[in-house]
């Protein structure tokens, strides 16, 4: 058995979390693209009427298309960090998980961008990268990848000695809670209607809200379509800030617990 403290770099790079993370990231983008493409019609408005509602439909769909895979990818980055922490020293896990998550974020964009662009049609006269709202929400969502990976390492260190059966039960509860929190954020409509503290304490809520409000901040009752509110800017700030806090707190806690454990 390879000791955590002396594992060579080659063994770290062959870890299953590293080997499968990038293909899984790309697959999540491809799978989520049709889901995101129909999100507006299924969850928001199945029959948009008038110029403003039609614009909101096209604009929201554009946001959702180009951010395909980011929310699932964030969870995958957290899982990768958690799994790496179970096999390696915390510092080694961090040194592997954080760069890996950066590459995962890059893969997400590399796969989503051409797919989203090919399905966009001729409605917009400017490119996606010329849209400051889209660029901003994509930037904050991608910035969360390495933060989630670091948080996953800390979480893995905290639960390192939890019995395997209890660890699987905890993973199921955490996964279901993560999905529910993300959906809560995605179902916000042009303003955040849930308690504001959720944005700052539950990062997946903030992640979903940032995407939703970026796409659904169109005044559909105006004579001409125009964006209102902050288009998810506050949610994006909350996402990065809260993910950073979790990363720091969990790693400090994990480091302290591992120092106190025998062996």
Image (cartoon, rainbow, N blue to C red):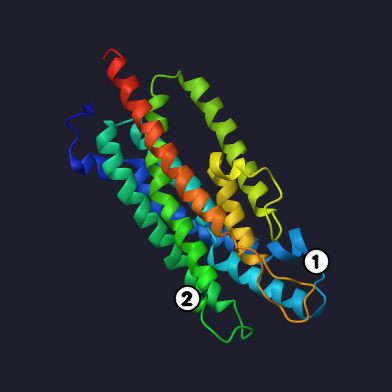
Quarter holding residue 32:
bottom right
Residue 73 vs 179, above or below: the answer is below
Q: Residue at x 52, y 21 (%)?
A: 166
Distance from the alpha carbon under mark 1 to that under mark 2: 28 Å
Tell me where residue 161 appears, x and y as whole percent. Answer: 39, 19
User: From the viewer's perspective, is the residue at label 1 or at label 2 nearer?
Assistant: 2
For label 2, the SS is: helix
Residue nearest the viewer, comparing 112 with 206: 206
Query: How many other residues sit within 10 Å of disc 2, few (<14), some (14-19) or many (≥20)?
Result: few
Coordinates of residue 114 in the picture (x, y in percent): 48, 74
For label 1, the residue is 46
Q: Could one spot residue 14 in this view of the protein?
A: no
The percent position of residue 103, horizontal first and vertical second, equals 35, 56
- Residue placed under numbered mark 2 in the picture: 129
Tell me if 242 is positioned left or right of 202 in this view. Answer: left
Q: Nearer the viewer, residue 54 or 213?
A: 213
């Amino acid at each position: 058995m390879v000791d955590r403290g002396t594992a060579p770099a080659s063994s770290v790079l062959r870890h299953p979390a590293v080997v499968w993370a990038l293909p899984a990231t790309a697959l999540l983008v491809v799978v989520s693209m049709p889901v995101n493409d129909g999100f507006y019609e299924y969850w928001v408005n199945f029959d948009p009427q008038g110029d403003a509602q039609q614009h909101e439909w096209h604009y929201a769909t554009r946001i959702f298309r180009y951010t395909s895979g980011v929310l699932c990818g964030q969870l995958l980055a957290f899982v990768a960090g958690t799994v790496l922490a179970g096999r390696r020293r915390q510092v080694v896990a961090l040194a592997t998980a954080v760069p890996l998550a950066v590459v995962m974020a890059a893969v997400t964009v590399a796969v989503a961008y051409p797919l989203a662009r090919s399905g966009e049609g001729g409605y917009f006269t400017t490119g996606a990268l010329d849209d400051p709202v889209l660029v901003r929400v994509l930037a904050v969502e991608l910035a969360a990848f390495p933060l989630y990976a670091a948080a996953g390492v800390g979480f893995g260190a905290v639960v390192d000695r939890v019995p395997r059966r209890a660890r699987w039960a905890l993973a199921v509860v955490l996964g279901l809670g993560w999905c529910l929190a993300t959906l809560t954020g995605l179902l916000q409509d042009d303003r955040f209607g849930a308690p504001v503290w959720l944005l700052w304490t539950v990062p997946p809520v903030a992640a979903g809200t940032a995407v939703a409000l970026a796409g659904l901040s169109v005044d559909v009752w105006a004579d001409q379509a125009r964006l209102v509110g902050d288009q998810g800017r506050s949610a994006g700030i909350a996402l990065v800030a809260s993910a950073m806090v979790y990363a720091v707190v969990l790693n400090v806690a994990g480091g302290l617990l591992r120092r106190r454990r025998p062996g």
